[in-house]
Image (tube, rainbow, N blue to C red):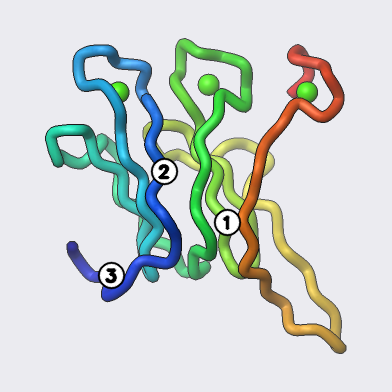
Amino acid sequence: MGKNDYFTGSPVVGDLDRNAENCLEVIMPGRTEVIAWHADGSLVDGWPIDTSSYPSGSPITADVDNNPSNGLEIITSHYNQIEIRSADSSIRSGWPWPIQGSAEFYNAHYAEISVGNIDGNMMTG
Ligand SMILES: [Ca+2]
Ligand SMILES: [Ca+2]
Ligand SMILES: [Ca+2]
């Protein structure tokens, strides 16, 4: 499985590219990279991505830009930041979002993430 010697969260399944022919993709966070496979085991174009920010917890997929034509976006949790990437693995504008600590607390988190339309507005993100 490449250079990862262990995974850091559970796999997530979603139709990243909204391609009915190859069905669902599987995204898996590893220690040094996040990998996305098609159902036939081939890598999704643009993946895996190297990461210097240790992934923590499991990624999630959602159509966060409310644009189904570009597929699903992938939200990954890292010990020091949250990232949103497009299905082709490119980082989305405005991301990553840093997790900032203080002198008294360790600057890291190891929590799961979730997504929802908390303002009820589908038009402004
Ligand atoms: Ca697909
Ligand atoms: Ca989308
Ligand atoms: Ca919203």
Which element carries disc 1, helix, strand or loop? strand
Q: Are marks 2 and 3 in contact (CB under 8 Å)?
A: no
Which residue is more in the foreground, 53 or 113?
Answer: 113
Mark closer to the observer (1, 2): 2
In which quadrant of the rendered view does residue 123 lie?
Answer: top right
Q: Quadrant of the C terminus?
A: top right
Which residue is tagged 1? 77
Which element carries disc 3, helix, strand or loop? loop
In which quadrant of the rendered view does residue 39 lie?
Answer: top left
Which residue is tagged 2? 12
Mark closer to the observer (2, 3): 2
Q: Is residue 58 left or right of residue 40?
A: right
| First-in-chain label (1 vs 2) | 2
Ligand 3, image quadrant it occupies: top right
Q: Are marks 1 and 2 in contact (CB under 8 Å)?
A: no
Check disc 3: other Cα within 10 Å, few if <14, some if 14-19, many if 20+.
Answer: some
Which residue is more in the foreground, 79 or 57?
Answer: 57
Residue 4 is marked as 3
Q: Is residue 75 left or right of residue 113?
A: left
Q: Amino acid at mark 2?
A: Val
In the depicted structure, whether residue 3 falls above or below residue 73: below
In the depicted structure, whether residue 61 falls above or below residue 80: above
Report, in whole angstroms, how far the alpha carbon at label 3 lies from the one at label 1.
17 Å
Q: Is residue 44 left or right of residue 49?
A: left
